[in-house]
Amino acid sequence: MRITLAALLLALASPAGATAIDEFRAGDWAGAVREGRAENTVESLILSGRAGLAIAGYQTTDKARALAIVAAAEGDFDKALARDPASVPAQLQKAVAIAYRAQLTRGIALAKETRRRFETIRAAHPDNSLVWGALGGWHGGAVATVGSFLAGTALGAKKTEMERCYAQALKLAPGLPSTRVFFAITLLDLDASNANRAAGLLKGLENLPTQDGFETLLKRQGLELAAVLAKGDAAAAQATARKLKAFSRIV
């Protein structure tokens, strides 16, 4: 029996018996999507959706394709929520998917819905560091995108809220690499003069453990940004931070 090259490569790329969590931990996003949907559990569908968001945000250069991938990921979260409406990870990732659609389409209504969903989750789970960090990113990202005045009047976004939310996220989970990296990127996206603060957030990042492939991706980004910051060129650091943001590859 002839074995095609494509089949051989697929076999080598996907270890026998690999599960969605295995693929996600390894950072194999396509594998996590495939296995997550095949396993078809609440947990695996969340992993599939998260992997899809990673592909859309960090590996895709076409806006229409990115939107299609985000929509498919959102469908995974919807299926997970249909089975377990109380799932906080599914609720949070559903809100992130909407945030991605808002970012890609510049949709004000979607941005407002994102904030409402994040705040609803935070009210019910005030000890969840991820939702605090997501809200910090929402406020900071809105201000960086359209400026303080428009972000405040149209969306209610404020730099002070960004600071408060990220501070609480760091208090709740000081050793989580993604929170530190997202905060550093947001600060630099807002203003190159935040270079010293960003460098402080990334100090010691190399010693922090990662829980999965996405944390590893963010840690790698943080180390890249820290290396640029160490050279003392704030403008270059800001350019690097913006390059590392989700959807920076969209042309």
Image: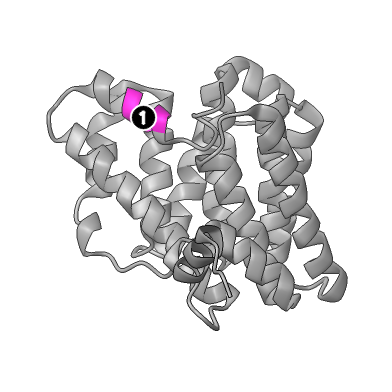
Establish if 158 lies above or below 55. Answer: above
Furthest residue to the front?
1
Establish if 68 lies above or below 209. Answer: above
Look at the image and give the residue range highlighted in magenta: 239-243
Image check: 195 left or right of 118? left
Image check: 43 left or right of 85? left
**Residue at image location 61% in from the left, 58% down from the top:** 50
Furthest residue to the left?
231
**Residue at image location 62% in from the left, 28% down from the top:** 62
Furthest residue to the right?
82
Amino acid at the residue labelled 1: Leu
Q: Quadrant of the C terminus?
A: top right
Image check: 193 left or right of 9? left
Residue 64: x and y in percent read: 71, 30
Q: In which image quadrant can residue 17 be found?
A: bottom right
Magenta stretch: dominant SS? helix
The residue indicated by pointer 1 is: 188
**Residue at image location 46% in from the left, 66% down from the top:** 13
User: Is residue 135 in view?
Assistant: yes
Q: Is residue 2 magenta?
A: no
Establish if 38 lies above or below 240. Answer: below
User: Is residue 115 in view?
Assistant: no
Residue 81: x and y in percent read: 81, 67
Disc 1 crowd rating (10 Å Cα; few below 14, some 14-19, many 20+) is many
Q: Element under label 1? A: helix
Q: In which image quadrant can residue 155 be found?
A: top right
Question: 108 or 23, which lies in front?
Answer: 23
Residue 247: x and y in percent read: 55, 33
Q: Quadrant of the N terminus?
A: bottom right
